[in-house]
Image (cartoon, coloured by chain):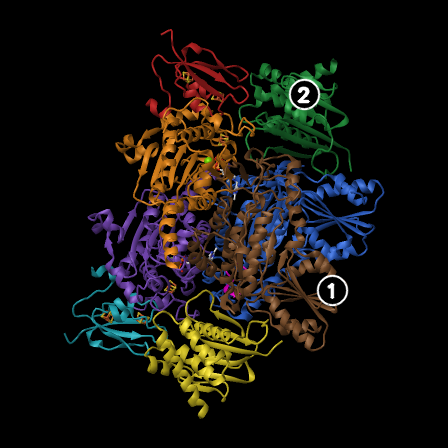
Chain colours: A green, B yellow, C brown, D blue, E cyan, F red, G purple, H orange
Amino acid sequence: MSERIEIRLAGTGGQGMILAGIVLADAAIRDGKQVVQTQSYGPEARGGASRAEIIIADGPIHYPKVLDADILLCMSQVACDRYGMMMRRGGLLIVDNNQVSRTPTAYAVQAPITQLAREKTGREITANVVALGVLVGLTGVVSRSSLEAAVRARAPKGTKDMNLEALAAGFEAAQELMQE
Amino acid sequence: MSERIEIRLAGTGGQGMILAGIVLADAAIRDGKQVVQTQSYGPEARGGASRAEIIIADGPIHYPKVLDADILLCMSQVACDRYGMMMRRGGLLIVDNNQVSRTPTAYAVQAPITQLAREKTGREITANVVALGVLVGLTGVVSRSSLEAAVRARAPKGTKDMNLEALAAGFEAAQELMQE
Amino acid sequence: MNRVLMQGDEACAEGAIAAGCNFFAGYPITPATEIAEVMAHRLPQQDGVFIQMEDEIASMAAVIGAAVGGARAMTATSGPGFSLMQENIGYAAMAEIPCVIANVQRLGPSTGRPTSPAQGDVMQARWGTHGDHPIIVLCPSSVRESFDLTVKAFEFSERYRTPVILLLDEIIGHMREGVELPADKTTLNVKREQTLVPPEWYKPFENLATDVPPLIPFGEGYRYHITGLHHDERGYPTDKVDEVEAWTARVYSKIKQALSEVLLYEENGIKQADTLVVAYGISARSARHAVEMARNRGRRVGFLKLQTLWPFPEEVIEQAAERIHRIIVPEMNLGQLALEVERVAGRRKVRRVNRADGEVIKPEQILSAIEGMR
Amino acid sequence: MNRVLMQGDEACAEGAIAAGCNFFAGYPITPATEIAEVMAHRLPQQDGVFIQMEDEIASMAAVIGAAVGGARAMTATSGPGFSLMQENIGYAAMAEIPCVIANVQRLGPSTGRPTSPAQGDVMQARWGTHGDHPIIVLCPSSVRESFDLTVKAFEFSERYRTPVILLLDEIIGHMREGVELPADKTTLNVKREQTLVPPEWYKPFENLATDVPPLIPFGEGYRYHITGLHHDERGYPTDKVDEVEAWTARVYSKIKQALSEVLLYEENGIKQADTLVVAYGISARSARHAVEMARNRGRRVGFLKLQTLWPFPEEVIEQAAERIHRIIVPEMNLGQLALEVERVAGRRKVRRVNRADGEVIKPEQILSAIEGMR
Amino acid sequence: MSDKETGSKKKRGKRGQIQIFPNWCKGCGLCVEFCPMKVLEQGSNGAILVAHPEKCTACRWCELHCPDFAIFVTEISAEEE
Amino acid sequence: MSDKETGSKKKRGKRGQIQIFPNWCKGCGLCVEFCPMKVLEQGSNGAILVAHPEKCTACRWCELHCPDFAIFVTEISAEEE
Amino acid sequence: MKTQPESKVHERYLRHSKKFPNVWCAGCGIGIVLGAIIRAIDSLSLDKNDVAMISGIGCTGRMPVYVDFNTMHTTHGRAIAFATGLKLARPTMKVIVVMGDGDALAIGGNHFIHAARRNIGLTAIVVNNLTYGMTGGQYSPTTPLGARASTAPYGHIEPSFRIAELAVTAGAPFVARSTVYHVAELQKYIAQAISTQGFSVVEATSYCHTTLGRINRWGRAPDMMRRLKENSVTVQQAEKMSEEEKKAKIIRGILSDRKDIPEYTELYREQIIRQAKGEKA
Amino acid sequence: MKTQPESKVHERYLRHSKKFPNVWCAGCGIGIVLGAIIRAIDSLSLDKNDVAMISGIGCTGRMPVYVDFNTMHTTHGRAIAFATGLKLARPTMKVIVVMGDGDALAIGGNHFIHAARRNIGLTAIVVNNLTYGMTGGQYSPTTPLGARASTAPYGHIEPSFRIAELAVTAGAPFVARSTVYHVAELQKYIAQAISTQGFSVVEATSYCHTTLGRINRWGRAPDMMRRLKENSVTVQQAEKMSEEEKKAKIIRGILSDRKDIPEYTELYREQIIRQAKGEKA
Ligand SMILES: Cc1ncc(C[n+]2csc(CCOP(=O)(O)OP(=O)(O)O)c2C)c(N)n1
Ligand SMILES: Cc1ncc(C[n+]2csc(CCOP(=O)(O)OP(=O)(O)O)c2C)c(N)n1
Ligand code: SF4
Ligand code: SF4
Ligand code: SF4
Ligand code: SF4
Ligand code: SF4
Ligand code: SF4
Ligand SMILES: [Mg+2]
Ligand SMILES: [Mg+2]
């Protein structure tokens, strides 16, 4: 069993967590990695919690779900309350501090993701891509070029540029965070 | 296992073989016997072969179908061709010789059942009851009084008398046949 | 003596009425139509309702709806209709609605031979719905048993809040035997369980010690919710894993707790036997005949007639099998309950005797198996 | 390299198209809807037909009708819809119509938890219809396998003239993996068998040596009859016992003859093992993970992944079980295929690992079983 | 009732010759009861007899209504008239 | 559009007091867009604000159309007028 | 289109390998409808290879086995859905669906109205004998109010569907009704229906003397045939009658004959497939 | 009958133990229909214990869980059949069946027309949002011609059912149609429907901006609400329009209000049971 990196992106319906998961998985493939992406949503209903999981590895991935997240992104307080503790010891917790006020550990990385989205692209809906930029900028789980390519390939028609800007904003924020 | 008498009444749809079987079974109950009556008809279709089976015994009857008929009544050539050989050695074969011209054994009892029905009651439809008279007259598998009671109880509304006449005609014919 | 000549289908209907059945919804199908016809005649005589629905799916739905309204409700069908009912049978299992479904089996698959008997739906009765849930399946082998087991079916359905399936077959359904029905039928009347708690406290799916919370009919002041989604004790949809687990545990446990009552069977001469015949339904009659023949020839053959097919009487078979060399399982299918017998008793001991061509298994066929020949 | 990120449902649809599927009839249901959606988009691009019918019963019927017209036809559904399809699946079995039914399993019973995975329909896939007939059931455990086994499903359905069921589950259906599909898909194209005999001689249900008479599509000059009744070699209804028997014997024999081809599985490290894990579908992934963990801890654990669930690979299990002390069968249900494993391998050897609450079995749970703890 | 609807075309001067397949005829009596010319009769054994062939106008009511394809009408030229 | 159908009863002189349950409101904007008097506005965070309470005529369009039972109108006597 | 059917025309259409007489009760109207269908098909000079006859389960459902077309006896109520698949796979085939009233309107009612809405090019012929013949005279969606049936021993209390009218509302472009007494008219409507591009419906009113007829003492086949003759009026005649008068009558005639709704399989090819290929290219 | 609904009337009808906000998307019309139903029931001063609300599966199917009646969420398409059993067991109960267009008219179409024919005393409220909302915007029996849907990527080619008209033809004595924009009218029709003895139908035209609306770029909830306002006419207005003009319009109003057909459960008791008991006695 090769080393696996387990990533969980958690938020509420409409925040685009699943699309973010797909983009990240796509980027991993472009890097030549093995990847499995899964998701969950409430029972055949609208809204509610939404969650994407991505496992990245060099060799075959059997169990497809996160066991203990290496990286956890929380885009809502509910998500943070629910998943905040379900992490590998020493894992990385990233929260959107526009949405999340309480974190279970002091080691959480706080980034104003929604705010950045609004400021840099004018549309909160790009927060998911900003978050990807932060996450990858901090961890390097995939290469930036692959991630950009994935965003380009998967962004809905007519939103490519906006999303690339969002991504850049995320990377920038990660840069700043690392300097802190 | 107590002794069992196996009776098969075979004809075509519309000849009332099943009703005859029910009447015979009813008579057996009135005699205090154990009885099982079953039937078969074509696959969910109109017309075609029709067959009733009656097992009469003093004790419990397990297997409910005829294994080797002790008594076989054939009211059509098709029935006779099909079941004529499926009898216990030494069993009794009764045929309506208005309907059946070939029998597989020379020992068959030939009775002009349909003709009797027409002559004695004016309605061929009573041939089934005539046949019961012949059968019971020859074999005594049930008592005549129980059989009469059963006919009375089961004859369709308004046909009681006609059927009792038919029954009497059958018994009469049996009498004559035994004297031959 | 008050023995009357009666068909199995008729006895099933009369058993239902004796048990207090006051609602029947169905759709005609050979060889179960007679049950509907008797019900159409008999139910209105006692203020009950008979309705012929537009199909079997609707029939099963109406039965559940009526049961929720407090009726003792049943339907009757055969293979094709039974297949159509599966989705709603699963609903009844999920929502724990007491109801009785009679399936008078005919030869399948598909339209098959509608006027011929078979025992081809034994596994379907257990596994015909999607997802996991327990179920009770009873199988009569005589006209009298059609009456008795229908009464039992209503009893079990109400006591354990579960759909109960009756498996007859074309022969049992259409066969006439002389039967003497209980003179006093009032003792057979099955009542719905009551609750002592006031509406505010009532939880229709509560985890009680008995595991069977009572189901209060709609319209009696206990307003609550019923759903086919996984739900909590109040009946509201849940996606909490522990609540899903609690439901599953409870519904399995309620049947498990009841095994000693629910498992009906008849043993005969098992103690002294080296060979055992395990049979049910119409085949049990051929089997019993064969057993008598074998005993007459000096063989030590035990006989076990199962009236409850599901839950499968594991322990009964296991115990019986212990001292036995060979188990014969005659079925009018290509080997269905035999799979369970093999699982419990070990494959090597079991000898299947099968026939699935519309004819009743002949005693000789079973006798040959008993005698070790083919 | 041309690896693309693809969902299991999508891969299933693409596999179907690669196999030559040119007809899809279905009704939306979570988590199978994506198969329909991909088909609605993709089929018309290659002259194929997608139609959304009024329900699942009609969908299954239309699939059979299209197959009779010569199409490579499929449908996709989940538990509730699968239950509704049973009657017509039985028809397809009886009339030997090639077609493919994908059931993307979700947590049951009833409406259950529509967005949660389960493996609760394994027995239903085998026994959901009334009456006896064989069936082929395949179960992928990855996105790539969803593609491959769908191709196989079409192959088997045409080659053996039988409905073939694909059992996916919510995880496999919605999961995305990077897959590299075969560049040249033309070799995957499944063709209907032809006949050499002229119309006058053609018997659509003939007892041939292969036991699989070819099915000539309607409209090509071979006018014949198809029915769900038991029928003779020409397809006309029969009530002759020997003709009924001949049909049954032939349809079982055609699958039996094909076992070596139809039984798909993957073994890993069985020879040296004392413990064996038998798994399928999504649970096979947890199982494989657990096996790796156990091996890392020095355990001698073999792994058998079943891709064909039905016909049940009796001999494979039997042989594997011979030298093995313990068999672990993890399933996302309350023990379904385990019943067969117990039957074949002996109950005492088998240890079931179950979970039916909508969550994937964790590797730890299986590891505990391997290590003999709970 | 117009002729067009029921198919009984009473063409003047036409004559019909009736052929019955006894093997297929079930003796339902439809043809007997509805033949406008009372051409047909039913024997005591149920068999259909062409009792008055000369009256047949070849209207084909019988043929078109026989549920068993057991009766056929051939038009013959009515030379006498 | 008649008032009867849509439930917006613009009774002259009537005044309404608006109450919003922020916990239930999903910010769909229906009430904002259709309030005939433009009483309501939506904040940048989606929350509904009673921007011009004085204009409300208690027509109850908002209340009857809120899919989430999140807005209520209480009629107050319009004493000033 | 030949208008004058030839004698023994059905000899060319019956299956010689299938045993006759047929399964139906003596005098049953189903055989009459079968004759009308055969003559209608013959009048259209269709190639037998291009004709399919699909049925559900019931006495009517036994029709296809006798005729030398591509024939299929499906499951109860589902014939139209099977036929829909066949038609989509073989759009040039003339697909005729024969059903009883129970088959088409009880268990099969949904497929019936959806096929009408979708306007798929099938011809549905419903033999309406007012009951479930095959299972022995239970009440059906067309059993008359007050009649007794084996499941209505106290008299039937449900209003009936008017099959043809329902088909019109559901969207069928060609709808006609006649009876087995008016067999030439019936044949003409069937020919028109088969010639229709879209979903066409012919309701053939018949009777079941063996079951419903016997229970209600309505007499033998000829008696019931006479009822059809006496109880029916044409659409034109009906227009002059009051609602009350009309209720008891069988209204014969063409109830709909629209040309403005495109047929589904054609539309599918012209619109969906063309566009899909355009988009792909 | 109170005509002026009181403020916060629904507080007395919502389940306090059920978590709010409800499951529906922001702005979904289903909640508006629920409000109208609650107010209609309140206007009739019914005892909550005597009211049952039964649904099938779909977004609309989630309605019953929120209201404090006897509630049941059944299987997809079968709500009417479940309700039929309940009504027969409890004839005095007011049984309200809420369904989506797919639930009521696709998979459930047969139960719908049979309940109408039988005239059993249920009130069927169909929230017609022109699509399968819950499963994500597939085409339904009422999806407009030409619209795109997740299963109609090249545009929809099937004509729609007109739900209310179909109910009338099938036999329903009370049938009305309105929209979620015309909520006061809708409430009035619902109250009338519930007061009807027999089978009553109210078609509540709504929208699904999240699925069908998004796919077709029809805008947000308020935009779709505006379409309802602009695209609807009353029955009276429609009478003056040509067929072509009418086609694109939602026709609001009462389409049937007959008193001449007896209700099934009542008839059952008065006719069947009385006669059975008479015969027995
Ligand atoms: C699913 C299913 N339910 C019930 C039956 C039993 N069945 C066979 S034919 C029939 C009804 C026949 O009535 P109809 O369709 O009017 O045809 P008819 O016999 O009157 O021509 C029924 C209920 C069946 N075969 N399959
Ligand atoms: C037998 C069955 N088939 C399919 C489904 C999946 N399903 C759930 S809701 C739904 C359709 C919803 O559409 P509609 O009835 O119009 O309700 P809406 O969500 O639009 O309110 C479907 C197909 C199911 N639950 N059961
Ligand atoms: S109509 Fe045909 S079957 Fe009937 S009696 Fe005449 S010839 Fe014979
Ligand atoms: S054709 Fe037939 S019906 Fe007409 S007159 Fe001759 S025999 Fe009579
Ligand atoms: S209509 Fe209701 S939910 Fe929508 S914004 Fe207004 S108050 Fe909020
Ligand atoms: S009641 Fe509501 S809609 Fe009417 S004016 Fe006041 S705020 Fe606006
Ligand atoms: S039972 Fe009725 S419908 Fe069936 S064949 Fe006989 S007469 Fe015709
Ligand atoms: S998906 Fe559509 S119907 Fe369902 S809640 Fe959302 S808007 Fe309403
Ligand atoms: Mg009929
Ligand atoms: Mg909808």
Q: In the image, which is nearer the foreground, mark 2 or mark 1? A: 1
Q: Is residue H180 visible?
A: yes
Q: Using the rendered view, name the quadrant where residue E17 is placed.
A: bottom left
Height in image: C207 above or below D318? Answer: above
**Do residues under tags 2 and 1 come within 8 Å of each other at their CB atoms?**
no
Q: Which residues are magenta?
A: C109-116
- Residue C114 highlighted magenta (yes or no): yes
Identify the residue at horizontal 43%, vertical 24% (top origin).
F65
Q: Is residue H185 left or right of residue C267?
A: left
Please state which amino acid type lies under the numbered disc 1.
Answer: Lys
Height in image: D191 above or below D76? Answer: below
User: Total label count?
Assistant: 2
Q: Label 1: how many residues lie within 10 Å, few (<14), some (14-19) or many (20+)?
A: some
Residue C207 screen position, x and y as percent: 64, 39
Check the image and name the residue furthest to the right: D298
Looking at the rendered structure, which numbered label has been put on residue A95?
2
Identify the residue at horizontal 32%, vertical 42% (top origin).
G260
Looking at the rendered structure, which numbered label has been put on residue C349?
1
Observer-nearest of G34 and B99: B99
Q: Using the rendered view, name the quadrant where residue E81 is placed.
A: bottom left
Q: Secondary structure at mark 2?
A: strand
Please state which amino acid type lies under the numbered disc 2.
Answer: Val
Cα distance in 3D space between marks 2 and 1: 64 Å
Q: Label 2: how many residues lie within 10 Å, few (<14), some (14-19) or many (20+)?
A: many
